[in-house]
Image (spheres, rainbow, N blue to C red):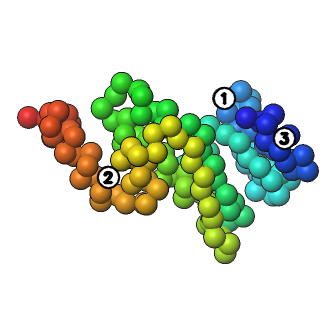
Amino acid sequence: MEEEVKKLFPGCKVFRMDADTTSRKGSHKEILEQFINGDGQILIGTQMIAKGLDIPEVTLVGVVSADVSLNIPDFRAAERTFQLLTQVAGRAGRGEASGDVIVQTYDPEHFSILTARDHDFISFYHREMSVRKALCYPPLAT
């Protein structure tokens, strides 16, 4: 991903945040500070950059293989996918400029993808609870 982004945007400095680049003590903070200070224009990362970042200059967020977590054999897979997508989408447009989110998915009609796209927490909840009730999964296990 990093190599392709550098080819597509040769004039931009690219930072990467993943287990390989943040294994050294303080490296997570160092990368974020450089990005926040404007030393780079693109930040590529794993799920670790989806939560808690408030960087007003971020106006575009992209998610690659957004639905890969739907294939994990866990009854919470749809919930986790929905949470991740809504969290990462919330990183874009936190400043004065509006933000955009691009999501690459193999299953664009899955309810967790559609409801995350629409920020429709209520519809997601009702759909997920009906599935869990039918299958006797928590919190509706009988």
Residue at the image position 59 percent from the left and 56 percent from the top: 101
Amino acid found under the numbered disc labelled 3: Lys
Q: Give the image location of residue 98, x and y in percent.
A: 63, 70
Q: Is residue 35 left or right of residue 126?
A: right
Check disc 2 and report the residue beneath it: 124
Is residue 67 placed above or below 41 in the rendered structure?
Answer: above
| Residue 132 x/y as whole percent | 21, 39
Classify mark 2: helix, strand or loop.
helix
Tell me which residue sits at (42%, 28%) in the image: 71
Quadrant of the image occupied by residue 48:
top right
User: Disc 3 marks which residue?
Assistant: 6
Q: Compared to 99, does 88 lie above or below?
A: above
Pointer 1 residue: 19
Q: Give the side of residue 69 with respect to residue 57, left or right.
A: left
Residue for point 29% across, 57% down? 123
Nearer to us: label 2 or label 1: 2
The earlier-in-sequence mark between 3 and 1 is 3
Count neighbours of disc 2 (C-alpha within 10 A) and say few if under 14, some if 14 to 19, many if 20 or more: many
Q: Amino acid at mark 1?
A: Ala
In front: label 3 or label 1: 3
Of callouts 2 and 3, which one flags the residue occurring earlier in the amino acid sequence? 3
Q: Residues within 10 Å of mark 1 (few under 14, many from 20)?
A: few
How packed mark 3 is, by other alpha carbons closer than 10 Å (few <14, some 14-19, many 20 or more), is: some
SS at mark 3? helix
Give the residue type at disc 2: Phe
